[in-house]
Structure formats: C-alpha cells, structure tokens
Image (spheres, helix red, strand yellow):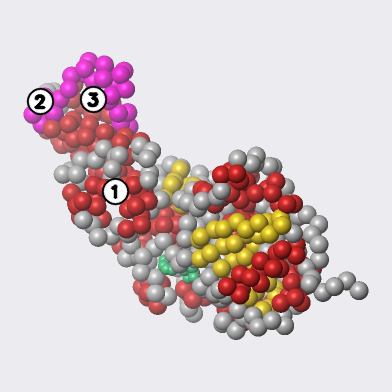
Amino acid sequence: MEKDASFLFGGISFNRKKFARDFDRFKGKIPVDSAEKLNFIEKEDKTIDDSLEKVEFVENEISGMEDGTSTSVSKKRKRKEKGKVPDVEGFSVFKSSKLKKEAASEETDQSVNELLQGKKEYYQQLERDAIFRKMHNIHVSGSNIPSPLLNFAELRSRYKCRSYLLRNLAKLGFKEPTPIQRQAIPVLLSGRECFACAPTGSGKTFAFVFPVLMKLKHTSKDGVRAVILSPTKELAAQTTRECKKLARKKFYIRLMTKQLAKSGDFSKLRCDVLISTPLRLKFAIQKRKLDLSRVEYLVLDESDKLFEPGMLEQVDFVVKACTNPSILRSLFSATLPDIVEDRARTIMHDAVRVIIGRKNSASETIEQKLVYVGSEEGKLLALRQSFAESLNPPVLVFVQNKERAKELYDELKLEDLRADVIHSDLSQIQRENAIDNFRAGKTWVLIATDVVARGMDFKGVNCVINYDFPDAAAAYIHRIGRSGRAGRSGQAITFYTEADIPFLRNIANVITSSGGEVPEWIMSLTKKKWRKHRPRRETISTQPDI
Ligand SMILES: Nc1ncnc2c1ncn2[C@@H]1O[C@H](COP(=O)(O)OP(=O)(O)OP(=O)(O)O)[C@@H](O)[C@H]1O
C-alpha cells in the first residue's frame, strides 16, 4: 500500500514522514480506479504545495522561537521579496512578537505559541482537505470552504446528525458518500449557498435532500420550509420518492400534483418540503395563495434547464415569492454553463462552487460510440441490427420529438422487443405506467423524447441509443447519463446522418473529455455553434407510401 500511496502522489511534493497519519488514514481506502485517475493528473497542485510551504514555514518559526534561531527579519524580507516566504495571513503578528520577544512576558509567548499552533493546525487541515479532494476529483472555489466528509459517520460527529437519518441511509445501502455528497453536504450544512456540478448518476439528489432534512430538524406547522424545483413532473415525482425514503415519516413531504395546485387548501395542509415543477408552483402561488415566505431552503435541480427561456420566468416568480431574507439557495446539475452561473450569482450570496471531475462532461462509466447511418432508413436498419446482434435490456431510445416517438413505436411495437413509448402527448397515468413498467423490467425498450432525458434514475439501463442526434451537448450528456449510474457501466450509441455531421465535433469533444476515443477525421472538423439542431427528418417507416 505504501507503494500505491507514492504512486498516487507522484508529482506532488509531499513530506511523507510528517503526514504519516494521513497516509494511514487513506491506506486501504483509495479505490484502484481513483489511484489510476490521480496518476493522470499532471498539473502540479499549487494549493497543496502552497499550504505545505506554509505549514513548514510556521513550524520553522515555532522551533526558531524556541531555540532563538528564527530567521532574521531582513533575511525574511529578502526571501519574501523573492517570493520564497509564503504569505501567511497574520504572520506580521508573529514577526513583531518575535522582535519584542525578550521584553514580552511569558504569557505573551504562550499566546503567540498558541496562535502559531492554531495556524499550523489550520494549514495542516487545509492540506489534508486538498489531498482528499484531489483523490475524489472534487474542485471547489469560494472562501472558507468546509472540509469534505471522510465518511457518513462524520455527519454525526461534525454536524450532530440525528440517528434516524443515518439509519435510513444505512437502510438504503449507502456505505460511502459519493464525491458530490462529500463536499456539497458540508457546504449546505454550514449554511452556505452552493453551485454544484457533478456527472449524471453521481448522487446529487441526496446531496441536497440530506442537508435540507438535517437542517429542518423536525416537522412544524409553520408551512412550507423547503422547496425543490425540478424541470419535469416525472423528475419531481422521483425526487419526492427519494426524499420520503430518507425522511420516512418524520416530515410532511409533498409533490405538487395538478390536483393540489388546482384545489389544495395550503392554509390547512401540513407541508415541510414541497417538490414541484416551476409552472405548477407558480400557479399555486397565484391561484391558491400558497405562502412561501417561510421557505428556508430553495433547491434548483437541473438548474441549467430551469434557467432556459420558457421556464426562467416561472422560476423567477418562485424565487421572488420566497421572501425569507435568510433563505439558502442551491443549484445542482450535471451541466452548468457559465451563463447560468453568471445569472445565478446575481441572486446568490457568497456561494461555494463545487465541481466534480470536469465541468459539463459525461460520466466516465459510459462507453460512447458514434455510428454513421447515412439516412433515416439507415437508422431503422442499424437499430434492428443492433437488437438482433445483442439486445441487452433495458434499452432507452431517444428521438427528436413526440411525432417521431409515435412513428418509431408503431414500427417496433409488433416486434418481439417489449417496446413502449413515452412523450408529452400521453396522459399523466400513461406516462407513469410507461416509467413503472420500464423500471419493473416489463418493458425492454423504451422509446422516449427528452421528457425523460434529465434526472430520471432507471436502475441498470444498459444502453442508451440516440436514434436522433441530440440538439445540444448538454442534451447529449443528460440522455446518455440514464445509463452508467451510481458507478455501474453503461453504453451509449449515437446515430448520425449527413445532416448531423456539422455538429459531430461537439459530441466528439464530450466523448474525448470523458476519456473516450473518436476517429481523427471527426476531431479535425470545426466546432459549430450549436443552437437547437433539429433538422426536418423523413418519417420513420418501412411501410411503402400508398
Ligand atoms: N452514497 C451513495 N452510495 C451508493 N449509491 C448512491 C449513493 N447516493 C446515491 N446513490 C444512488 O445513485 C443513483 C443516482 O443518484 P441520483 O439520481 O441522485 O444521481 P444524479 O447525480 O442526480 O443524476 P442526474 O444528473 O442524472 O440527475 C441513485 O440510484 C441513488 O440511489
């Protein structure tokens, strides 16, 4: 293991003797794949080096003061001018204390030593955090960022988490926090706002649900205290279920259904956590006089989708209705374009930014393939061929719109594929049935529009087929992210025709940035500005025109 550890920290200047305790702590806990990943991190981690330098510097000062050999002020100044003395905050205190040392009382010496000791421990903690974040591919920015969670038990030791929550976590079978949970949970628990971007299927839901439940402590008659916004009804329903799994019966957790939005009496209804789409929530605020003035937590899940034109106005309405001045807002998504961050910053205060892996990239557990099919007819042939060769259900097939979903379903429904379809023309019940049957394994192939592209957690989807090329890189990342979830492997196949070639490079970039390979000729194509690529496509049919 010692050998593994040195392999891990290759490229980082690290005093192994001094941090022997940290080695022990990490021993046996580093998954092989993360060790391998780390080996690829070529960039020198300046944060770690800086903080190491600071720790060493403070240590020298302590021993210098003890034996009277501390660096002279002029020497230090020269070193500082050369940039060799780290800019340790508060160092001037130590410096002037040193000069007055002879005259100072023993008491002063002691408090200086305590201050130095405090600084030393602070920088050692920073250094440990930096190493730990690097191991888990966690990137943060912002001030005074809380340490990541080493394990779930720290929720109790650091944050006094109530045992029922930990018991419920254990019942779910979660042993270790995922990287986004390690960092976003402490950020939110320490009362900070948060932008979080982590790959699809990496456990973002619990990263925001857990702190909300912990902070609310117990149910209350005060009305809604937490709101979670989701872009689709399906995702809102799923998040409600996940939230209930964790809370069990301790809180009133409600999904904003059509019925509730239309006729709910919110003055009488007990509700601690409300989960809704922006449209339904706006409707309930306007028509049912739903009061959100006591909301303490507002989560915008799939935040980039919520910030798209069409939904932005409704989200804005909800944000404005949450008038509690001490509200904490957080944004979560697997894709977080700069423009969304810039917009969100205008409403957030001193937010911490947490990015897992590379921003806006696909999950690395998905094997991605691009397949040239020539024409629309070619797609059907390729799909049938791929099913004939190896149909490994469950399989999700994405198409451009509901008309095409119906057409493809009509083509496949008579084949022995147990195919079903989901799109926005179906009733709520039909949509729910389609999802339930797919989840239960009764349906092998689900043909879908982007209505289920985001957030939906279908366990064990083996393959996602982009029958129609997606209309944006973010859509691609979310669609293929329905497979390869929670560390499992998955496969994504994207068909393309001549009409899609101008946008191929955009997808190729996503593939390469998540460790996949694409042919050289595709990488040499120029990247085209991509605005809703939805070409007119021929009807999906093998029936001759009459
Ligand atoms: N700590 C954990 N250990 C094991 N499994 C976990 C853990 N946390 C969450 N999961 C599981 O991982 C799966 C994916 O989680 P989740 O749906 O929250 O992903 P996500 O990051 O929100 O994905 P998306 O970007 O697609 O919305 C779920 O089935 C969830 O139960």
Residue pictured at 37% horizontal, 40% vertical: 42
Residue 385 lies, in percent from the top left, at: 63, 70
Q: Bounds of the magenta span?
A: 64-90
Image side of residue 490 versus residue 40, left or right = right
* Left or right side of 155 for 317: right
Q: How many marks?
A: 3
Q: Residue placed at 65% from the left, 39% from the top?
A: 526
Q: Looking at the rendered structure, which numbered label has been put on residue 68?
A: 2
Secondary-structure class at tag 1: helix
Q: Which mark is residue 290?
A: none
Label ID, residue 8: 1
Quadrant where the N terminus is found in the figure: bottom left
377 up-or-down from 17: above or below: below
Residue 48 is at least partly visible in this image: yes
Kind of residue indicated by mark 2? Gly
The numbered dot on residue 95 is 3
Of the numbered discs 3 and 1, the one sitting upstream in the chain is 1
- Marks 3, 1: nearer the viewer: 1
Q: Secondary structure at mark 2?
A: loop
Q: Residue at x 24, y 50 (%)?
A: 5
Along the line of sight, the residue nearer the viewer: 94 or 365: 365
Quarter residue 544 falls in = bottom right
